[in-house]
Amino acid sequence: MLEVLNLFKPEQPVIDIEVICSQLGYTSASAYRYVKELSNAGLLVRLPRGYALGPRIIELDRHMTQFDPLLAASRDIVGDLIAQTHLELLISELYDSTVINILQRSGADEQALNFGRGRPMDLFRSATAKVILAYLLPRQLKRLFDNAAPGDLERIGLTWKDFSKAMLRIRKDGYCISEGELDPGKSGIAAPIFDEKGRILGSITLAGNSERFNAFNREFLSTLMIDAARKITSRIAG
């Protein structure tokens, strides 16, 4: 039933029963039943042209902004990092095979990143996503590698051996740096955040104009990010 919510995209802000049936393969009876249940829960709202996302999602978003454990564990750290670097900061979280930015705070750059809060990110592009990718289980990595498009693998490794080495290098370093992979002229550095069982949960990223970013000593930035990620991880575990 919740797959219905995955149908909403910038180019498809409103859906109807026909769209649900054609894109998800549901029968009309199932589609009507699901939209009724989702509407009763406030997750959908009925419009003249079909169904749009409902007000309950806004309520949940507000709750997450105020009380999400990952955000709560990182608030003061976020402020300190921005004050020290004036770069843009992202907190991102993994679900299924998708990375979502759940927090974006601006630094000194006038032009913000295109991939801000709420935007799903390609697992094979950007330091934000690749530092998460590197800490997935081997079987997860192999599945993602086998299903990846050639264009994705060109940025990491076209063979499983090269891909595995790239992931191992990120784990060994404890951070990942990318340049221009999402926004031309923008660079970023990210470190992994783990849950209380040591599983990869998300990442913290500093990013900004490449000229400003490259003015920093890489060792300084990497130490800053690794320490910040470890503090957040420790707070979540505690």
Image: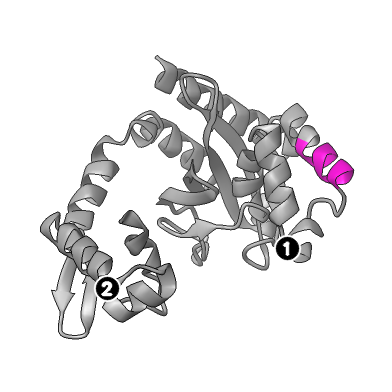
Location of residue 44 with respect to 146 vertically, above or below: below
From the image, tell me which residue sits under label 1: 149
Kindly identify the residue that appears in the image at 43 percent across and 51 percent down.
104
Q: Which residues are magenta?
A: 160-167
Residue drawn at (16%, 79%), measured in percent from left and top?
Answer: 47
> In the rendered image, which residue does mark 2 sit on?
28
Quadrant location of the C terminus in the rendered image? top left
User: x%, y% of residue 143?
Assistant: 69, 46
The residue depicted at 59 percent of the width and 51 percent of the height is: 207
Q: Indicate the position of residue 221 as horizontal and vertical percent values.
A: 66, 37
Q: Amino acid at mark 1?
A: Ala
In the image, 33 versus 59, the foreground residue is 33
Left/right placement of residue 106 relative to residue 66 reads right
* Amino acid type, mark 2: Ser
Q: In the rendered view, tell whether residue 158 sits above or below residue 46.
A: above
Number of the front mark, 2 or 1: 2
Q: Residues within 10 Å of mark 2 (few under 14, many from 20)?
A: some
Picture quarter containing residue 23? bottom left
Q: Secondary structure at mark 1?
A: loop
